[in-house]
Amino acid sequence: MNLLFLTCKDQREADSITEDLLKKHLIVCSKSTPVKSQFFWKGNIDKEDEVLVVMESDESRFKQIEKVVRSLHSYEQFVLVGFPVTQMAAGVEKWLNDGLE
């Protein structure tokens, strides 16, 4: 399993991206929550209200997910990162594999 984190400008954008990824069986689940972000952008410190999306998939689909996100995301440079999961509750791996078929 791979956990992916993505920030979006708002809930509408987050929903649009995750619905497309779910329909294409590239992720099996997404969770989103509002966040306040502070970051460097073009030499300045910016602050924005954003939506953080956490998605569950597998490592082999990262490039495909990135391609879909790139086609739908409004940011010039979005942040999409993935982290491998080393431990899962019983049954999670089967659920993940079934959902990604």
Image (cartoon, grey):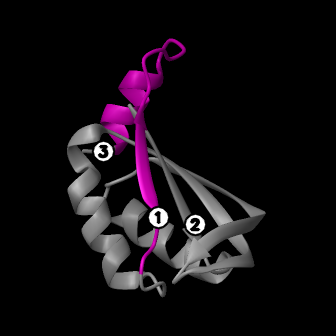
Residue beneath the point at 55% across and 81% down: 43
Instruction: Tell me the amino acid under the disc marked 3.
Output: Leu
Q: Is residue 10 above or below residue 81?
A: below
In the rendered image, which quarter is residue 25 located in? bottom left
Q: Which residue is mark 1?
A: 79
Q: Which residues are magenta?
A: 77-99
Q: Which residue is mark 3?
A: 100
Instruction: Tell me the amino acid under the disc marked 2.
Output: Thr
Q: Quadrant of the C terminus?
A: top left
Residue 28 position in % (x across, y down)? 44, 47
Instruction: Answer few, some or many: residues within 10 Å of disc 2's Cα (few below 14, many 20 plus, some between 14 and 19).
Output: many
Label 1, label 2: how far apart the Cα atoms are: 6 Å
Which is nearer the N-term, disc 1 or disc 3? 1
Residue beneath the point at 40% across and 83% down: 72
Residue 7: assigned label: 2
Residue beneath the point at 31% across and 33% down: 97
40 sits left or right of 17 in the view: right
